[in-house]
Image (cartoon, rainbow, N blue to C red):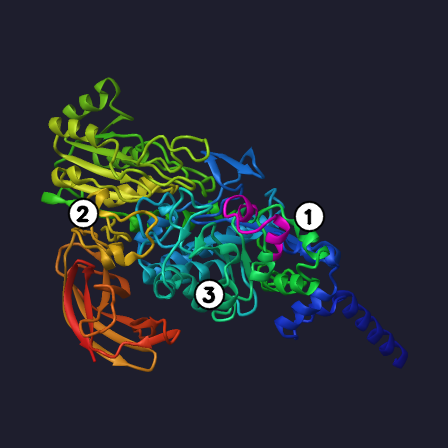
């Protein structure tokens, strides 16, 4: 028996050794210790390879995973060139692997709904693991390039579609939610790694590879970097991408703030990567280094840990010439290895390992609850911009024939960073379905060629015009947008005019009962439409449920509560020079001096809400809790987005005229009252003092303004 027990013991020890052949796999050790142990097993060549976007070393049993785009759903094949066509490694390839596609990030921002955004992240993360681990996709990734924490300070920015909005607090809160959704709630492991884009102040496309975004440290702390700071410190992200541009003359890929602020102050001990091709641009566009070998050394020393570019020969040469040491590379890659550890790649198992392994299971994108959720998100993203004489919701008793016209009535266009949806419910398809259910005849013309839209307008009781921008500029040539008001990556907009507004004017002379469905990635100066049309709604591109999201709002199944996440100006002349990054010169609702067409936080409803009994409920060391009673005084159930702004009437320091500090989207049944609690962080009521190099509490009385938009304040209370 003793001999048998000894044999069993020997077998157990041997089994344990076999299951755990490397010291870095000891999960009882501190994460940082495990990272350092792993590095000791790597050769110099392997260490250098860890500076690519591919995480893993097969020799040590660590599988290799790369990255995916994921702004509003998983994009397996990389940036979209056209519907169903992707580019991978510079070559176009068909991408017929479907993923769940939500509205553009700009539309997601219009929901003002934290829980909704977090759920989007959760669904996307499930699909990432499904494809990465299921031996289906050609490319395998667990690092997701999302969310975009950039601020949309100017509606001419070609990548406005990728941002949650112009306000740092709103974008910060939604960034936190998306990061949490993507990374999951397991205490040890991440479902995916959320890599935020693009640090920092990257909101001009024309000349972005060489221009400098110039502003002071206070704007850096309070505005441009704030969403990234929140994504790291509260969301838990440990990864972001440095942008192409300079800040105050220094390219972001090598800016000292990467190490000094993001790593040392905020605690980003994970990935900092260059943008695609940004390494070579340090030489060719910025002319910041004499050659790429010096540039490679500069990137490593700056705290950037990944090259999204061809880099290996220059990195090797930098080591050979003594510009950097092997220790420098070890320090740089430690963050990448930490991310791999959090993804479970260094361990035998993690809670997410089995996702995608069961080939008989229903894919996430085919699940009915996912499809219905996309429909819900789409409807909640819609902003009702105008609604005169109760034009909406459509009354089937009065409207019996509707002409649906316009280029986006029967097509869903993907943007530059979209995946391919498993199906597409267009506005026309949904209108035909709902029309059939309600006894409404639906007419259709894609455009007004040969006057066909005008002919239909004569017959119809109502005209639904579906128009807007093309998300990649209607041209597949890089850096070309034939329509001045279109924009995308590498192309800023040069007009805010809606190209089809003249056609709308013609239709209006025939049938003034027009509802404009503005399908767009950014604001337009639709002054004529706002002055004349009875109803206007805004929805962004890409959602696979665009059609039913729109019809749910048009017919009143969903009471709209989307809110503008950016100031819609009346005229392009209202905007400062696009390269003026000092927002105090008249940018965003915080400093805009004119009268907006649609102010920040604006959106109408089919019901009405009354605000009463606003008060400071309580305070503690970290937060102020403000309560306000909201009553739905109309006849329809609906959501209200309650917004709290702060202003500083007694301050000796320059502040914005008002700034968002809290918000909640709440559902209130008709006739009922709900007490809404708004939590205001006291740290958000401080300002950055450049002389003290720290945030300083405001000493004067603070005015807290509660309302339905930045221009619709209902209650004012004071905080001493």
* Residue at point 26%, 32% (across, down): 499
Q: In terms of image quadrants, where is residue 38?
A: bottom right
Residue 417 is a magenta residue? no
Which quarter of the rendered picture does the C terminus lie within?
A: bottom left
- Drawn side of residue 632 relative to residue 7, left or right: left
Residues at marks 2 and 1 touching, judged by CB atoms closer than 8 Å: no
Q: Which residues are magenta?
A: 280-297
Let me know if residue 402 appears in the view: no
Q: Residue at x 14, y 68 (%)?
A: 715
The residue wearing badge 3 is 232
- Per the image, label 1 sits on a secondary structure element best described as helix
Say whether residue 284 is magenta.
yes
Q: Position of residue 679 (x, y in %)?
A: 29, 72
Contact, CB < 8 Å: mark 3 with mark 1?
no
Query: Is 189 or 254 nearer to us in this picture?
Result: 254
Whether residue 473 sits left or right of residue 454 in the image: it is: right
Q: Quadrant of the N terminus?
A: bottom right
Residue placed most toward the observer, 595 or 534: 595
Instruction: From the viewer's side, name the closer residue of 660 and 654.
Output: 654
Q: Earlier in the sequence, mark 3 or mark 1?
A: 3
* Mark 3 residue crowding within 10 angstroms, few (<14) / some (14–19) / many (20+): many
**Mark 2, residues whose alpha carbon is within 10 Å: few (<14), some, or many (≥20)?**
some
Q: Are marks 3 and 2 in contact (CB under 8 Å)?
A: no
Q: CA distance from mark 2 to mark 1?
A: 53 Å
Q: Where is mark 2, residue-wise?
A: 597
Instruction: Spot the residue most to the right.
Output: 3
Per the rendering, the mark at residue 313 is 1
Answer left or right for 343 relative to 210. right
Instruction: Reply above or below: 35 against 296.
Output: below
Earlier-in-chain disc, 2 versus 1:
1
User: Disc 2 vs disc 1: which is toward the camera?
Assistant: 1
């Amino acid at each position: 028996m003793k001999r048998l027990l000894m044999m069993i013991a020997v077998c157990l020890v041997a089994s344990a050794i076999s299951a755990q052949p490397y010291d870095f796999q000891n999960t009882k050790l501190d994460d940082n210790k495990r990272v350092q142990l792993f590095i000791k097993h790597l050769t110099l060549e392997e260490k250098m390879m860890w500076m690519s976007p591919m995480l893993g070393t097969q020799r040590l049993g660590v599988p290799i995973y790369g990255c995916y785009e994921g702004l509003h759903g998983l994009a397996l094949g990389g940036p979209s060139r056209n519907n169903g066509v992707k580019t991978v490694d510079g070559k176009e390839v068909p991408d017929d692997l479907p993923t769940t596609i939500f509205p553009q990030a700009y539309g997601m921002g219009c929901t003002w709904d934290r829980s909704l955004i977090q759920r989007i992240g959760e669904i996307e993360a499930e699909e990432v693991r499904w494809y990465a681990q299921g031996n289906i996709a050609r490319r395998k990734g667990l690092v997701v390039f999302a969310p975009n924490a950039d601020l949309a300070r100017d509606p001419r920015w070609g990548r406005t579609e990728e941002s949650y909005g112009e306000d740092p607090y709103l974008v910060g809160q939604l960034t936190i939610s998306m990061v949490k959704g993507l990374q999951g709630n397991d205490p040890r492991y991440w479902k995916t790694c959320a890599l935020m884009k693009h640090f920092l102040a990257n909101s001009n496309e024309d000349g972005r590879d060489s221009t400098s975004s110039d502003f002071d440290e206070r704007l850096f702390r309070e505005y441009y970097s704030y969403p990234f700071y929140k994504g790291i410190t509260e969301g838990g992200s440990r990864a972001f991408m440095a942008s192409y541009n300079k800040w105050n003359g220094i390219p972001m890929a090598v800016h000292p703030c990467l190490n000094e602020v993001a790593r040392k102050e905020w605690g980003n001990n994970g990935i900092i990567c260059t943008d695609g091709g940004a390494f070579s641009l340090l030489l060719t566009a910025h002319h910041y280094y004499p050659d790429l070998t010096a540039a490679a050394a500069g990137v490593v020393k700056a705290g950037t840990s990944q090259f999204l570019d061809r880099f290996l020969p220059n990195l090797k040469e930098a080591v050979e010439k003594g510009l950097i040491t092997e220790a420098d590379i070890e320090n740089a890659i430690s963050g990448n290895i930490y991310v791999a550890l959090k993804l479970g790649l260094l361990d035998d198992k993690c809670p997410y390992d089995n996702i995608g392994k069961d080939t008989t299971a229903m894919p996430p994108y085919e699940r009915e609850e996912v499809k219905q959720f996309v429909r819900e998100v789409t409807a909640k993203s819609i902003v009702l911009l105008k609604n005169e004489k109760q034009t909406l919701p459509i009354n089937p008793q009065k409207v019996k024939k509707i002409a649906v016209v316009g280029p986006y009535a029967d097509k869903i266009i993907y943007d530059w960073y979209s995946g391919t949806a498993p199906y597409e419910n267009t506005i026309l398809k949904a209108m035909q379905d709902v029309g059939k259910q309600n006894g409404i005849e639906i007419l259709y013309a894609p455009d007004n060629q040969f006057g066909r839209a005008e002919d239909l307008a004569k017959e119809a009781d109502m005209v639904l015009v579906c128009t807007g921008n093309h998300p990649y500029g209607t041209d597949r040539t890089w850096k070309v947008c034939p329509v001045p008001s279109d924009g995308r990556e590498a192309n800023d907009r040069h007009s805010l005019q809606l190209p089809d507004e003249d056609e709308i004017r013609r239709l209006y002379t025939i049938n003034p009962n027009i509802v404009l469905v503005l399908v767009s990635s950014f604001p337009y100066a639709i002054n004529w439409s706002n002055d004349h049309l009875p109803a206007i709604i805004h929805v962004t591109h890409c959602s696979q449920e665009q059609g039913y999201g729109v019809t749910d709002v048009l017919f009143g199944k969903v009471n709209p509560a989307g809110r503008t996440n950016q100031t819609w100006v009346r005229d392009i002349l209202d905007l400062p020079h696009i390269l003026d990054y000092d927002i105090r010169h008249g940018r965003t609702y915080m400093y805009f001096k004119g009268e907006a067409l649609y102010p920040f936080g604006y959106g109408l409803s089919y019901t009405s809400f009354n605000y009463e009994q606003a008060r400071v409920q309580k305070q503690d060391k970290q937060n102020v809790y403000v309560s306000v009673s909201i009553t739905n005084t109309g006849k329809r159930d609906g959501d209200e987005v309650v917004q709290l702004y702060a202003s500083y009437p007694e301050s000796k320091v320059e502040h914005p005229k008002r700034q968002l500090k809290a918000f909640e989207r709440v559902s209130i049944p008709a006739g009922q009252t709900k007490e809404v609690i708004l939590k205001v962080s006291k740290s958000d009521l401080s300002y950055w003092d450049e002389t003290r190099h720290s945030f300083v509490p405001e000493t004067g009385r603070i005015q807290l303004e509660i309302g339905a938009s930045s221009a619709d304040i209902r209650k004012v209370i004071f905080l001493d």
